[in-house]
Amino acid sequence: DVQERRRSRSPVERRRSRSRSRERRDDARRRDLEERNRSSREDHDRRDEKRPKKDKERELFGQCPFHFTFTYLTRALVTLTYVFSAEVLDVDSLKGADKEIAKMMGFVSFSTTKNKKVTGNTDGVVMINKPRRYRQYMNRKGGFNRPLDYVA
């Protein structure tokens, strides 16, 4: 009698089974949903078989912002590979390219004007907020529990 006792005095755990009517209802819903999905999938496949290949391509690539077709993309890829494989650039020819580009864009160098005087910049006004400086309040008589003294 003593050996059969459990450590916990809580009631014995019993498995609660769902009501049969609920199980039947859930099973019926699941079957209906599967059947609906299967039938719509079959209809979609049949529709795809009837349509020509060009329509399918147009549907796939028509959503692209520039309305590329698959054949156009492959043709462009072939021409690009031909152009780049035929033209080999020398490193020596690119040496002055960055200077030419900078001249075309209208500036000579990439330096900054920070902390430099710039001619024609007299109208510029800058608000400089200096951070406040406070007196020492630790390690002094009456330092804690009183407001900081402002130093101008």
Image (cartoon, grey):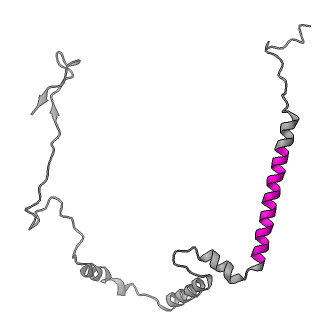
The residue nearer to you, when weighing 48 against 103, is: 48
For the point 52% across and 86% down, the residue is: 80
- Numbered-mark total: 0
x and y percent of residue 136 in the render?
17, 26
Image height check: is 64 above or below 36? below
For the point 79% across and 73% down, the residue is: 46
Q: Give the range drawn in magenta.
A: 26-49
Quadrant showing the C terminus: top left
The kind of secondary structure the magenta stretch mainly shows is: helix
Q: Which residue lies furthest to the top in this view?
A: 2
x and y percent of residue 50 in the render?
77, 79
- 39 magenta-colored: yes
Q: Which residue lies furthest to the bottom in this view?
A: 86
x and y percent of residue 20 in the render?
88, 35
Residue 132 appears in which quarter of the rendering?
Answer: top left
Image height check: is 20 above or below 68? above
Report whether 27 appears left or right of 96.
Answer: right
Quadrant showing the N terminus: top right
The residue nearer to you, when weighing 37 against 125, is: 37
